Image (tube, rainbow, N blue to C red):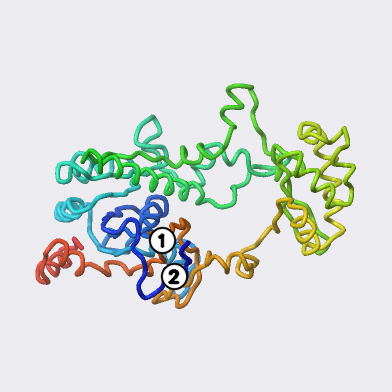
Amino acid sequence: MASMASMASPNPPPRALEGLRVLDLATFIAAPFCAGLLAELGADVIKVEQPEGGDSLRELGEKLHGRALFWALEGRGKRSVTCNLRVPRGQALALELIQRSDIVVENFRPGTLERWNLGYERMRDVNPGVILVRVSAYGQTGPYAERPGFGRIAQAFGGLTYLAGFPDRPPVNPGTATLADYSAGLFGAVAALAAKQYRDRTGQGQEIDISLFESIFRLVDIVPLAYDALGIVRERNGSRAHAAPHDHYPTADGKWIAIACTNDRIFRRLAGAMGEPAWGTDPDFDIMEKRAARRAVVDARVGGWTGRRSLAELRELLDAAEVPNSPIYSIADIFEDPQYAARGTLTAVDDPILGHVRMQAPVPRLSETPARVPRPAPEVGEHNAEIYGELLGLDADVLEGLRAEGVI
């Protein structure tokens, strides 16, 4: 399999989506992440931004030298043009870009593109094969369709936040408020490629409706099924899971270790690693149902054992016994871990403003058409002349006139 180092070689292999053009009309995270995933796989992604200020993601969160880190990550791999979609001349320019694109992504509130004369029907008039990925908080239909919403709202509405935290405390945000955005973007990328496969067979494009809340709802495993079939309302249970022992346990050196025993064989191996092999066949604990019923006792016993040993000693014992385990890593720990280094999971990007910085590498590892670390995130309208000139054939005088009118 190709390594990340080979992806940066002087003669890199082709990428899977080379020749595919994606028009990113979106803002913030969800739909732009969808487009960014396609860029990492080789698509030419044209980011359309408002002339004044560009994507609001450029102002989100922490900054260095005035550059938002969110933009440095999620804007990478794209070419940027400016276009005022609220005015007729800007809409006409957008339609010319749509005519020359395979996939369009957007995440405005439902009805916005239609008010701008850029709805799917209008897109299809100029490009019958166009694939439109639409991301919104509640979807394009239903009584809540026009309500605004972000990741935190979708995670609450989609049932995930209710499950996050401990039973005697208020629900917490599950890890990050952008989880719904990223999951929606991932579903959007999968759907876009499925639609392209269909278009390759039929020549017909289609409209894709992705909601933030449904993207989260799809990730809450069997919670809906358990309620409908068994009447079970799953409550917050902290770090516990269905299995036991299957939790986070303290170490003697003030750290935490995750241990996962998802079947009876692993439990017997854990009991052996603990120096208590008889516990693995104890009739009170030998099968999962019994251990789950005595979860507090099981966790106390495992936690007492881990609490008397260092993290390094525990990892050595558990790895030798083939018991799944991991330290509870901070990002500082991740930057020092040899597995991350060996796989190039953190990759360096030479950002013109941030400098030489590390961020997440592309995730899919394809043997013949590997993803590559894309170009750094562009400045607002950095590629106006390149795209409007080369793709649409507009000369410098026309572009200057469009700038003077506030269209680009």
On screen, residue 375 above or below 206: below
Task: Kindly indicate the quadrant of the structure image that contains residue 376.
Answer: bottom left
**Image marks 1 and 2: residues in contact by CB distance under 8 Å:** yes
On screen, residue 327 above or below 189: below
Please give the name of the residue rendered at 57% of the width and 36% of the height, measured from the top-left corner.
221
Could you tell me if residue 49 is visible in this image?
no
On screen, residue 291 above or below 82: above
Residue type at tag 2: Ser
Please give the name of the residue rendered at 36% of the width and 76% of the height, measured from the top-left corner.
10
Toward the viewer: 322 or 234?
322
- Give the mark nearer the N terminus: 1 vs 2: 2
Where's residue 170, x and y in %? 67, 42
Where's residue 301, x and y in %? 86, 46
Give the left or right position of residue 350, taking residue 90 as reference.
Answer: right
Quarter of the figure that contains the C terminus:
bottom left
Task: Name the residue tied to disc 1.
Answer: 370
Could you tell me if residue 238 is visible in this image?
yes
Res. 50 mark: none
Q: Residues within 10 Å of mark 1 (few under 14, many from 20)?
A: many
| Alpha carbon distance from label 1 to label 2 | 9 Å
SS label for mark 1: loop
Res. 6 mark: 2
Give the left or right position of residue 180, taking residue 161 as reference.
Answer: left
Please give the name of the residue rendered at 48% of the width and 57% of the height, measured from the top-left corner.
363
Where's residue 118, x and y in %? 21, 45
Task: Kindly indicate the quadrant of the structure image that contains residue 265.
Answer: top right
SS label for mark 2: helix
Residue type at tag 1: Pro
Task: Kindly indicate the quadrant of the structure image that contains residue 337.
Answer: bottom right
